[in-house]
Image (cartoon, rainbow, N blue to C red):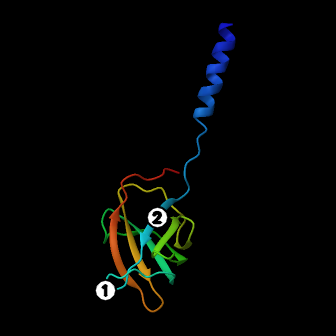
Amino acid sequence: MKNLSFLFAAFLLGLATVAQTPQGINYQTVIRDGDGNIMPDTELSLQMTIRSGASDGAVVYAETHGATTNAFGLVNLVIGYGTPLNNAFPTLTGAMLKNTLKPPSTWMEAEATPLWELPSF
């Protein structure tokens, strides 16, 4: 009976160690125009750039996404699933996420956000 209990415990422990690591970072934002008005139902391109250390640090990874805002100007995407501009989606430590937005006309810089907790691959 002890052997059966030991095998069952070992099996459960084995299941716990097989957890999958996420292959991307969920990202959500509301798109506004220069006057602060929400931009509903608007097609645009987003470039997500991950930089090392600070918002002006070396580019570790960059990708673009084609997106359309919903009625509330909301966009959802997964960083790591866009069109890569360099390298493969990396293991990141101490990085900054730099957002660059391209509405229908030209690219605009957006804010930089620290990445506090990152997936490890």
Q: Which structural element holds mark 1?
A: loop
Which residue appears at 37% of the width and 58% of the height? 115
Residue sticking out furthest to the bottom: 105
Which residue appears at 62% of the width and 26% of the height? 12
Residue sticking out furthest to the front: 71
Total marks in image: 2
Residue 80: quadrant of the picture: bottom right
User: Which numbered mark, 2 or 1, is in the foreground of this view?
Assistant: 1
Calculate the distance from the C-alpha at mark 2 to the C-alpha at mark 1.
23 Å
Above or below, 101 against 26 in this view is below
Q: Quadrant of the N terminus?
A: top right
Left or right: residue 80 compared with residue 118: right
Above or below, 19 against 13 in this view is below
Front one among 49 and 26: 26
Where residue 44 appears, as percent x and y from the top left, is 50, 83
**Residue annotated with mark 1:** 35
Q: Label 1 neighbourhood size at 10 Å, few (<14), some (14-19), many (20+)?
A: few
**Residue annotated with mark 2:** 27
Left or right: residue 20 compared with residue 94: right
Where residue 46 appears, as percent x and y from the top left, is 47, 77
Which residue appears at 47% of the width and 81% of the height? 40
Q: Looking at numbered disc 1 in the image, what kind of residue is underneath it?
A: Asp
